[in-house]
Amino acid sequence: MATLLPFYKSGLLEAGCDEAGRGCLAGPVFAAAVILTPDFRHELLNDSKQLSEKRRYLLREYIEKHALTYAVASYSPQEIDQVNILNASIYSMHRALEQLKIQPEHIIVDGNRFKNYGTIPSQTIVKGDGKYLSIAAASVLAKTYRDDYMLELHKQFPRYGWDKNKGYPTKDHREAIKLYGITPHHRRSFRLLDEQLMLDL
């Protein structure tokens, strides 16, 4: 496992940001912002997609206990439909940054797109969740908080299998949309069905 770097710019209060759920058909997009202490380390911490569910939840507990500050925020399906998923991902990161108890002096973001957050300098980093500790920590928080949210939604809408697919476009999820229609939690601006199954949604 590659060793993740502590900071992009050392000596500054640096927040790492990442999102989860961008490619889903249902549910909000979640984002997290995390500022870590200079001595923060955990041998298991990595991009959340590379971790088992058990390890993600173990890491969440550790991150929340040892981070300098962290916050998690989301953008609803209705907001996603209004502003598009790229903007919703960025704005949910802004919401998380707003909630931090300490304002960062620098921001690093997973991916290649971001919009300035106030006057705080920022840097996008492709595959940053596998390179920097704070982005990896943000990816773990965003993913686990979103999974928890989808598990709660599953109790209300069990036909869609959100306990397993978490809203992603699996074959079973699309088949359920075909059979039962959409819920208020589906993103109407997304292609919810394959072309050969398109319905008037």
Image (cartoon, rainbow, N blue to C red):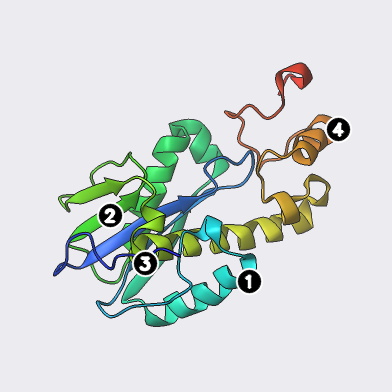
| Quadrant housing the N terminus | bottom left
Name the residue that disc number 1 marks: 54
* Pointer 4 or 1: first along the chain: 1
At x 37%, y 45%, the residue is: 91
Which element is circle 4 on? helix
Task: Please name the amino acid that badge 3 sits on.
Answer: Thr
Q: Nearer the viewer, residue 28 or 6?
A: 6
Which element is circle 1 on? helix
* Pointer 4 or 3: first along the chain: 3
Residue 3, label in figure: 3
Residue 54, percent from left and from top: 63, 71
Task: Please name the amino acid that badge 4 sits on.
Answer: Leu
Tell me whether circle 4 and circle 1 mark residues in contact (CB < 8 Å). Answer: no
* Pointer 2 or 4: first along the chain: 2
Mark 2 neighbour class, 10 Å CA radius: few under 14, some 14 to 19, many 20 or more: many
Name the residue that disc number 2 marks: 108
Q: Nearer the viewer, residue 81 or 123?
A: 123
Task: Please name the amino acid that badge 2 sits on.
Answer: Ile
Q: Quadrant of residue 16?
A: bottom left
Residue 2, percent from left and from top: 40, 63
* Pointer 3 or 1: first along the chain: 3
Tell me whether circle 2 and circle 4 mark residues in contact (CB < 8 Å). Answer: no
| Quadrant housing the C terminus | top right
